[in-house]
Amino acid sequence: MPGRRQTRLILAVDTPDPVVALGWMQFAGRRCDAVKLGLEFTLANGPVAVGCLAEGHRLFLDLKLHDIPNTVAASVRALAPLRPAMLTVHAAGGAAMIEAAAEAVREAYPADAQPILLAVTVLTSLDAESLHAAGVAGGPRQQVLRLGRLAIAAGATGLVCSPHEVAPLRDSLGQGPCLVVPGVRPAGAASGDQKRVMTPAEARDAGADWIVVGRPITRAADPAAAAAAIAAELAG
């Protein structure tokens, strides 16, 4: 389709075991455009192990920082040696926190190697009932749009959202923000704990820049083939 957005694939390396993580990255990681390392691996092995494992890969460091502005800014600066290509904070931390994180990125990272600062809007494990129980008015779409507008205005350069909110965010914020989309499952794959899902092609057509896929690849009988099939679907 001429002019269609290029949507790229991130492999979610969600394991505390560095040997297992290395195996996934050696095989499936070569079929992907980036790898995601998050709390599970980082807390089990430490930031030095994150840097070693991610060597040679584009790193999506998904720690979802959420604290007072000074603490988040200090954390963003402390992560600079890992050279992440993408780094997450929680949009619910508020405008001042996001502004502090954005300023830390500008201060601590070289101008040509600054990570995309991604604000996580609403986790893909949450639905309208879950949000209501937490006291959030409106459903996921309203909350994602509310937090997305706040985060971009405060200096975030991208957002993490479910595939169901990609099109509304594009309508509201235009083509500028980078949209990274978990909750993507190939047709026929189990949803697991994800509640707002789409297929890779559906997420691409909605306007996602990146999709994040973990278990449908890492738990496949042939992870490399599973990753290659998703990459082919995105390119199709």
Image: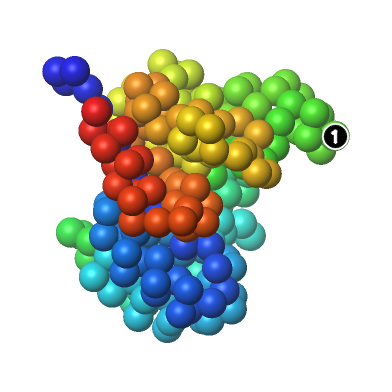
- Closer to the camera in the image, 186 or 180: 186
- Closer to the camera in the image, 155 or 136: 136
Graded by Cα atoms within 10 Å as few (under 14), some (14 to 19) or many (20 or more), the crowding at tag 1 reads few
Q: Report x, y in % for residue 13.
A: 47, 62
Q: Report x, y in % for residue 10.
A: 37, 50
Q: In this view of the protein, can residue 151 be seen by the observer? A: no
Left or right position of 50 against 42: left
Q: Residue furthest right?
A: 133
Secondary structure beneath dot 1 equals: helix
Instruction: Reply above or below: 51 against 191.
Output: below
- Closer to the camera in the image, 221 or 126: 221
Q: Residue furthest left?
A: 2
Tell me where residue 77 sits by quadrant. Answer: bottom left
Left or right position of 33 against 96: left
Quadrant containing the N terminus in the rendered view: top left
- Closer to the camera in the image, 7 or 94: 7
Tell me where residue 144 sits by quadrant. Answer: top right
Tell me where residue 126 sits by quadrant. Answer: top right
Q: Report x, y in % for residue 40.
A: 59, 68
What's the residue type where badge 1 is placed? Ala
Residue at 53% x, 25% y is 164
Label 1 belongs to which residue? Answer: 133
Residue at 51% x, 81% y is 46
Quadrant containing the C terminus in the rendered view: top left
Q: Report x, y in % for residue 183.
A: 54, 39
Left or right position of 143 against 159: right
Residue at 32% x, 42% y is 229
